[in-house]
Amino acid sequence: MQLATTPESGAYLIAPDPSRAGLTREVTGTDQYGQAVTLSVVEERPLTIFLNSREIVTAMTIGDYPKYLALGFLRNQGMLSDADVVTGVDFDEELETVVVRTEHETSHEEKLQKKTRTSGCAVGTVFGDMMEGIEELTLPDTSVKTSDLYALAHQINRTPSLYLEAGAIHGTVLCQGNRPLVYMEDVGRHNAVDKIAGWMFDQDVPADDKLLYTTGRLTSEMVIKTALMGISVLASRSGFTAWGVEIAQQVGLTLIGRMRGQRFVCLAGEHRLIRDVDPATVPQEDKKHRRKSGG
């Protein structure tokens, strides 16, 4: 695992590495005045995910952590369960493929027959019934302090990242209390949360005391993925969709959006919030650290 301990980022188990080769490239152009400019832009490339001998999907991704992306995608689509034993994950950079191998063949053909196009940028695809398993969910009743929410937003927004380097990317952060643990980025917010899910699955990390922070919109798919991961709190700088709010209320997930400076809005799961700090005492965001919603 990569340990980042810069003054701005604190200690993450996995943090963005904007300097990593292959994630960005410089492109020249002109600005509104016709002056020459050079920009660092995010690379994206295809990654085809296989489950044993079956090709499942080709995702557009920045290419880091292909193992976690594949495991998390399959886990979040219900193609990998707790009962499945993963015997290996093979990544071929030249062929741009990742193969997840299990001890026994899994039953996933039915899910391949039914696809739902999601609202995610990069046009995500969800296999099978999006609501499958939602009705039986019981999320942990873990409380969340508003002081922790403010502390997380303050640290995450100051963490060196591809977003601050080049923009055009989403971030998702797995947090515990007031500490951000794993910070993943990708061209689609679904890829970013799948990487988190894959890391948790691979490392056998419990979800009952975790919080998920995302820079993207709080849509139905994001709520469903968070709930199926067993995480009971989802927060974002961005806004909500009506169905996302409805599903969060249905499953009892705490949904917090529009987190900027002193402000946030909770539209579901208010009972988990412990308001232990006066918002008026929280500093406003400096413009140099202010990031857009990513939505």
Image (tube, rainbow, N blue to C red):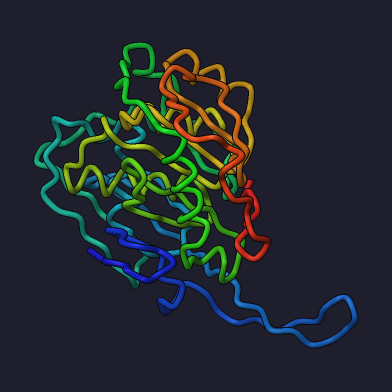
Is residue 262 visible to us here?
yes
> For the point 36% across and 45% down, which residue is it?
178
Q: In which quadrant of the rendered view does residue 37 lie?
A: bottom right
Give the percent coordinates (x, y) of residue 235: 49, 37
Q: How many marks?
A: 0
Quick one: 12 or 194, which is closer to the camera?
12
Farthest bottom residue in view: 36
Q: Is residue 152 left or right of residue 66?
A: right
Is residue 118 visible to us here?
no
Give the percent coordinates (x, y) of residue 87: 10, 49
Relative to 20, residue 151 above or below: above
Relative to 73, residue 39 above or below: below
Q: Is residue 164 left or right of residue 180?
A: right
Quick one: 81 or 13, which is closer to the camera?
13
Quick one: 4 or 194, which is closer to the camera?
4
Q: Is residue 246 left or right of residue 207?
A: right
Quick one: 240 or 194, which is closer to the camera?
240
Quadrant (top left/top right/bottom left/bottom right) for the N terminus: bottom left
Give the percent coordinates (x, y) of residue 197: 32, 43
> For the point 52% across and 42% down, which residue is it?
124
Relative to 34, residue 208 above or below: above
> For the point 41% across and 30% down, which residue is it?
233
Q: Is residue 60 left or right of residue 138?
A: right
> For the point 47% across and 28% down, which residue is it?
275
Give the percent coordinates (x, y) of residue 232: 37, 27
